């Protein structure tokens, strides 16, 4: 990870006009995820200052890639192969991970990543050397360690919110340990049942949103207390939530869901926008908003990437369906992560999924399929897509 990246959060700008045309693939990491079978990715996230990129994969490892100084190879030549600057192994299956808000590579003390994994406490990692900077431990009524299923920092980074079964626990980021504020999401037969599988803090209001495996969505005050708004019966269990920068709109994508839904938090009784995005699996398929909050980018389980202009008017009909501004094919596998660079016209996508052999397939048929070429699924890779006119990040800067 490089110190002192060329971009800072204050230099953000709107995406270029080229967003309406397919981007150009300029770099990828395939070899890194091809060394072990079934090593599919579980999303990707640009650092807040844009200096590096964080990924998670099925080998229970977090990887950090530096922003390449040049993007794209010679015309007709092979694409540059991305090599991680840091690998951080976790103890077991990783449930969630996130950057500390306000992270800046020029301030090493701010370069932190939180992660949660099965049968482990929440870990706080140093993004420069991979050292463990702290652990946050949650215990149940039997004094047994519980693993958080979802993570989210408060906008100022002083608090770490962790989702559990029927509760959210809030830790002080600067004081690792077991001391926390426990906030039940279900009591007296009311509220959100089930595991809190995703969390999001509003950047403009003192609110946070919880998505439950019980197919419910709730809004809560960050100061504590019960839900101020609750949607008890969604079409699918939410796996990813995202507020717009003004905090007035909330987007939610679910597992085995055909749409991303959007609400105005001032009127949660009706859906504001419906964005078609087919997801045929239970895995989390993460989407992203550009810094202005206008454009949303997401992959799907069919290998396509879609871009929506969320300020455009939806189509007339029984539901406010918003057609995509752009749709292009990334590969022949599930695109489970999409992350827009905070200041450059650069998109990162992650792909892959757990594969199960067909029950009627024989060993001989599998060998024949392997000899014929790559399968329609099983493309575990990280890809970088360039929307700008220049060939390098330095030129665009």
Image (spheres, helix red, strand yellow):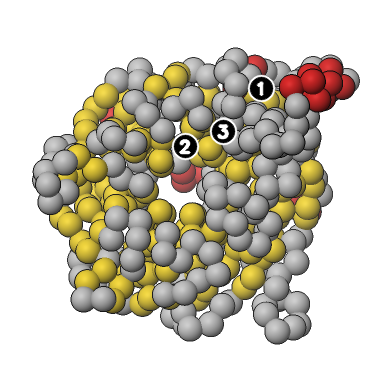
Q: Which tag is nearer the camera, tag 1 or tag 2? A: 1
Kindly state the secondary structure of the residue where label 2 is placed: loop
Q: CA distance from mark 2 to mark 3?
A: 17 Å
Looking at the rendered structure, which numbered label has been put on residue 30? 1
Instruction: Residue under label 2, please give it.
Output: 47
- On the image, the x and y values in percent for residue 22 come to 80, 45
| Label of residue 41 in the image | 3
Query: To which quarter of the image does residue 79 belong?
Result: top right
Query: Earlier along the polypeptide chain: callout 1 or callout 2?
Result: 1
Q: CA distance from mark 1 to mark 2?
A: 21 Å
Q: Is residue 124 above or below residue 232?
A: above
Q: Nearer the viewer, residue 119 or 316?
A: 119
Left or right, 329 with respect to 67, comes to right
Position of the C terminus, as image quadrant, is top right
Quarter holding the N terminus is: top left
In the figure, is residue 259 to the left or right of 186? Answer: right
**Considering only vertical position in the picture, is 180 above or below 184?**
above
């Amino acid at each position: 990870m490089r110190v002192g990246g060329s971009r800072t959060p204050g230099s953000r700008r709107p995406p270029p006009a080229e967003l309406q045309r397919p981007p150009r693939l300029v770099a990828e990491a395939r070899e890194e995820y091809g060394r072990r079978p079934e090593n599919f990715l579980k999303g990707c996230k640009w650092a807040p200052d844009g200096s590096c990129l964080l990924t998670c994969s099925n080998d229970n490892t977090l990887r950090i890639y530096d922003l390449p100084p040049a993007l794209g190879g010679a015309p007709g030549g092979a694409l540059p192969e991305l090599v991680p600057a840091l690998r951080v192994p976790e103890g077991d299956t990783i449930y969630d991970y996130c950057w500390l808000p306000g992270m800046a590579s020029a301030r090493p003390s701010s370069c932190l990543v939180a992660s949660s994994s099965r049968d482990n406490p929440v870990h706080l990692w140093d993004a420069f050397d991979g050292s463990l900077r702290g652990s946050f431990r949650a215990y149940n009524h039997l004094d047994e360690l519980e693993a958080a299923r979802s993570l989210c920092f408060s906008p100022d980074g002083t608090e770490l919110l962790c989702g559990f079964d029927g509760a959210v626990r809030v830790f002080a980021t600067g004081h690792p340990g077991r001391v926390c504020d426990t906030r039940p999401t279900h009591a007296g037969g009311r509220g959100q049942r089930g595991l809190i599988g995703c969390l999001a803090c509003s950047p403009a209001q003192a609110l946070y949103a919880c998505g439950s495996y019980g197919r419910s969505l709730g809004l809560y005050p960050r100061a504590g207390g019960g839900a101020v708004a609750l949607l008890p019966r969604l079409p699918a269990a939410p796996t990813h939530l995202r507020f717009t920068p003004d905090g007035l709109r909330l987007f939610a994508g679910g597992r085995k869901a055909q749409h991303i839904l959007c609400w105005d938090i001032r009127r949660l009784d009706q859906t504001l926008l419906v964005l078609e995005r087919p997801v045929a699996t239970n895995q989390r398929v993460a989407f992203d908003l550009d810094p202005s909050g206008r454009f949303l980018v997401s992959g799907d389980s069919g290998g396509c990437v879609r871009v929506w202009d969320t300020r455009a008017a939806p189509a007339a009909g029984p539901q406010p369906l918003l057609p995509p501004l752009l749709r292009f094919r990334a590969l022949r596998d599930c695109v489970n992560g999409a992350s827009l660079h905070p200041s450059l016209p650069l998109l990162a996508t992650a792909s892959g999924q757990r594969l199960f052999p067909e029950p009627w397939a024989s060993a001989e048929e599998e060998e024949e399929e392997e000899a014929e070429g790559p399968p329609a699924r099983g493309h575990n890779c990280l890809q970088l897509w360039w929307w700008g006119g220049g060939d390098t990040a330095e030129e665009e800067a």
